[in-house]
Image (spheres, grey):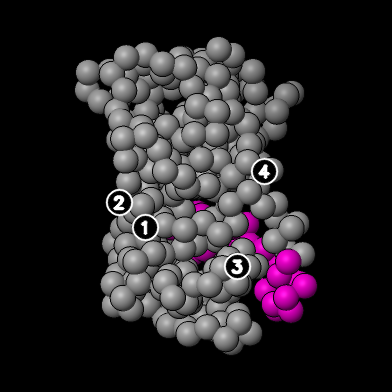
């Protein structure tokens, strides 16, 4: 019987993934990654319900060094990183692979909604899930080696189906509320989290495109590009954060129509399913984790960056976030969005 190590959070997705692997004939070890917060109790409950072995794997030091600390430092630079997309290749999968090595398992698994298939020339292809729920965007920085070891038991399923199957199997996770926030900032207050770690920037001015002062901000670390809520500025029309000016400690506010752009530059490219491309090519691009894709011409540059020229205007993305390109369902690349 083949062994597989599953990242088991205790939520409905990983719980149903564990059940499916067991039903498929795998010997499953449920591993809860101790990142320095949270409780293993829900994951342990799922393991008990399914009758699979369970272990807690220490990963707090790695998560602090590779995810939380860089996350805080990036915010102080006016960037908005995506910690989940960074955690998967740097902490989550390496930890599961180490647990697999210790247990003598060849494969690891997670409850992500995406697909993995063999591709040409021995490469592994990462594809969108094919349904409304798709998390391939969050896996865009994985390596070929990691993909070759990974199983995704929820491929092709919808969220409602997963909840239904889990409920029918009597899994307690089926009735749990799903969290939408970053795991280490459960209340979603990034500014308060940063300040609790001593990471604070001074107050400054909100300004418009002409340099007129519109009000006071509470520190650049409390804002991100595209933000509308919580500005505390009165105006005839809705205003949005368009630029964080670290040099002058100002935040530029503009109307919604001034947030649009047709060009975005990506650096630190990870060519996920295909070899690096040197010539311009067409792609459908996600600049955020939601379902929307926008057609673009992707132009590789000599320094390894990738310039995206969109067919239609897109809302200006936050620097530090992830830009991900697709060809149909096939995920081509993922890269970090740069400042203009």
Which quadrant of the figure has residue 195? bottom left
Q: In the rendered image, which residue does mark 1 sit on?
A: 149
Residue range in magenta is 165-194
Whether residue 335 is situated above or below residue 98 in the rendered picture: above
Instruction: Say which element carries label 1.
Output: helix
Q: Which mark is residue 54?
A: none
Is any atom of residue 240 visible in this view? yes
What is the tally of numbered marks visible in this picture?
4
Instruction: Say which element carries label 4.
Output: loop
Tell me, yes or no, whether the highlighted magenta stretch contains residue 143: no
Whether residue 123 is situated above or below residue 146 in the rendered picture: above
Q: CA distance from mark 3 to mark 4?
A: 18 Å
Q: In the rendered image, which residue does mark 2 sit on?
A: 145
Mark 1 and mark 4 lie on one chain; the one further toward the N terminus is 4
The reply to whether the C-beta atoms of the residues labelled 1 and 4 are less than 8 Å apart is no
Q: 10 Å neighbourhood of mark 2: few (<14), some, or many (≥20)?
A: few
Q: Nearer the viewer, mark 3 or mark 4?
A: 3
Task: Report the residue at 57% width, 86% height from top.
Answer: 51
Q: 10 Å neighbourhood of mark 4: few (<14), some, or many (≥20)?
A: few
Residue 281 image position (x, y, % from top left): 41, 16
């Amino acid at each position: 019987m083949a062994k597989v190590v599953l990242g088991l959070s205790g939520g409905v997705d990983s719980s149903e993934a564990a059940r499916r692997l067991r039903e498929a004939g795998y010997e499953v070890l449920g591993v809860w990654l101790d990142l320095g917060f949270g409780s293993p109790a829900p994951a342990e409950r799922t393991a008990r319900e399914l009758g699979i072995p369970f272990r807690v794997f220490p990963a707090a030091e790695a998560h602090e060094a590779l995810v939380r600390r860089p996350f805080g430092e990036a915010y102080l630079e006016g960037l908005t990183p995506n910690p989940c997309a960074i955690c998967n290749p740097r902490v989550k999968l390496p930890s599961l692979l180490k647990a697999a090595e210790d247990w003598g398992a060849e494969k690891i698994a997670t409850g992500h909604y995406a697909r993995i298939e063999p591709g040409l020339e021995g490469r592994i292809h990462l594809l969108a899930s094919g349904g409304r729920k798709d998390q391939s965007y969050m896996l865009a920085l994985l390596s070929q080696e990691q993909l070759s070891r990974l199983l995704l038991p929820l491929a092709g399923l919808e969220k409602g189906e997963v909840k239904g199957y889990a409920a029918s199997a009597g899994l307690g996770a089926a009735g749990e509320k799903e969290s939408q926030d970053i795991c280490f900032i459960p209340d979603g207050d990034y500014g308060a989290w940063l300040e609790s770690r001593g990471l604070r920037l001074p107050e400054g001015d909100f300004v418009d495109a002409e340099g007129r002062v519109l009000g006071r901000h509470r520190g650049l670390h409390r804002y991100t590009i595209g933000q509308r809520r919580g500005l505390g500025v009165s105006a005839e029309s809705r205003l949005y954060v368009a630029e964080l000016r670290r040099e002058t400690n100002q935040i530029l506010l503009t109307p919604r129509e001034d947030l649009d752009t047709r060009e975005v530059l990506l650096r630190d490219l990870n060519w996920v399913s295909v070899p690096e491309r040197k010539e311009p090519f067409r792609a459908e691009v996600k600049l955020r984790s939601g379902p929307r894709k926008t057609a673009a011409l992707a132009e590789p540059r000599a320094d390894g960056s990738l310039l995206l020229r969109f067919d239609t205007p897109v809302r200006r993305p936050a620097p530090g976030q992830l830009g991900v390109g697709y060809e149909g369902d096939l995920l081509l690349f993922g890269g970090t969005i740069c400042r203009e």
